[in-house]
Amino acid sequence: MQAGPVEDPVLTKLAEPEELRRQPGLEDEWQRIQKLAGSKGVSLGKYFEELMRFGARYGASAVPYMQALLSNPDWQIRAAVLRALGATGTAEAQAILKKTIRPDAVLEDAAQATLTLGEMGDPTITAWLREKWQSVPEGDLKRCLLDTLASRPYAQTADFFPTLLKSSSLDSEAKASVLSNLGFHQEAPLSLLTPFLGSKDEALRGGAYDALACRPEARLGSQLISLSAHENDASLRQKAYEAAGHQLDTTPLEMAAVVAGESDPAARLRAERAWGMTVGRTDNQEDRRRFDTEAVPRLVTEALKNPDPGEQRAALQALAMARTAGSRSGLEKIAQETTSPQLSKLAAAMAKGGEKRDLKGKK
């Protein structure tokens, strides 16, 4: 006699009669949210916000309603539901998310379920993710699981990542992604990240630069600038400049020198953005005047003339971060002269934001 399938007690609970789970107002609220999905002028973002509120308010009682939408043919709807399930913070939601994380699932669904599960606070999730990562075959889902593990509290993975980063079984691109994520989530010790600055592998150095861009307390500005001078690849210099700009000990004088010596246009723009970061942290009027005189005209031209939206935004960011009178005037000039409505709106908002910060600082 063969044993029957093992039932998940949490998922079984979801099959209980609805009246046993219903809370006052839940049904009406759900119907209101579903009407939004078919309403003209209602964005997916608005629908997602409503789903999140619904999940947070009704908890386990909301789960069966949202679960029914996971068969929706629109992957964006499914992604919104998977994220909203995490807002319930329940074991029922965890069970559904875990069931979705499998190699034969639609990749977008499995990846979103992984990311959502990784954002939930239950510490047992970390061990589950580790086991799942070890069991799935190589591919995008395995990489997503690893990146999500890197976003978990470092105390829960301290026995895992130091060994894994030394292992030859993990390729350098995956290690670089891990380094970047570990840096972003702040808790990993700098002693785990900084040795990779000296790696012969470009991908690993890039991952270390990305990590340190999120760790201003490292105070490695001079070292990062020195390392950038030895990077032949302009894209790696961009990463090094970004990391250097975020370091609390990097000075405007240092970044001004980097800008003067950089010949690659995209890398120079990132160096100017890092220069703007350092200027925004200083009260030295000479440093601020120099940025207004040398960098602002170039950045305004870049924003108005460069056809690449990414480069335009980088120029705006450099101006906004500097927080000088000249940079604010530059943003206002861009807002008035650009032919792009989106760029004009963004530049005006940045200029207004800088003005508000300045007024707040004077109070």
Image (tube, rainbow, N blue to C red):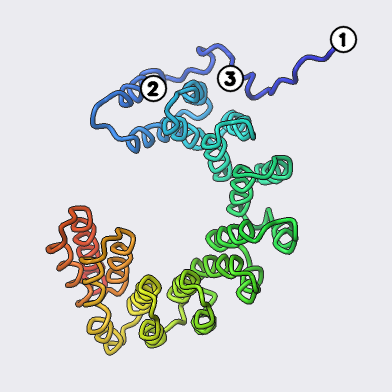
Residue matched to label 2: 30
Amino acid at dot 1:
Met
Q: Reading the chain from its start, which is encountered first: label 1 or label 3? A: 1
- Callout 3, which amino acid? Leu
C-alpha gap between disc 1 and disc 2: 44 Å
Residue 310 vs residue 197: left or right? left
Q: Specify the quadrant that holds the N terminus.
A: top right
Q: Which residue, as the protein is rendered here, is positioned at the far top?
A: 1
Assign a secondary structure to mark 2: helix
Question: Residue tagged by mark 3?
Answer: 14
Q: Residue at x 35, y 32 (%)?
A: 47
What is the x, y in percent for residue 27? 40, 18
Q: How many numbered discs sit on the rendered protein?
A: 3
**Mark 1 or mark 2, which has the lower sequence index?**
1
From the top left corner, tell me how far across and down residue 124 is, in percent: 68, 42
Q: Identify residue for label 1.
A: 1
Q: Is residue 342 left or right of residue 62?
A: left
Give the class, few, some or many, for how many residues have Cα within 10 Å of label 1's Cα (few <14, many ≥20). Answer: few
1 vs 3, front mark: 1
Vertical position of residue 152 compared to residue 117: above or below: below
The image quarter in which residue 160 lies: bottom right
Seen from the viewer's position, the closer of residues 98 and 168 is 168
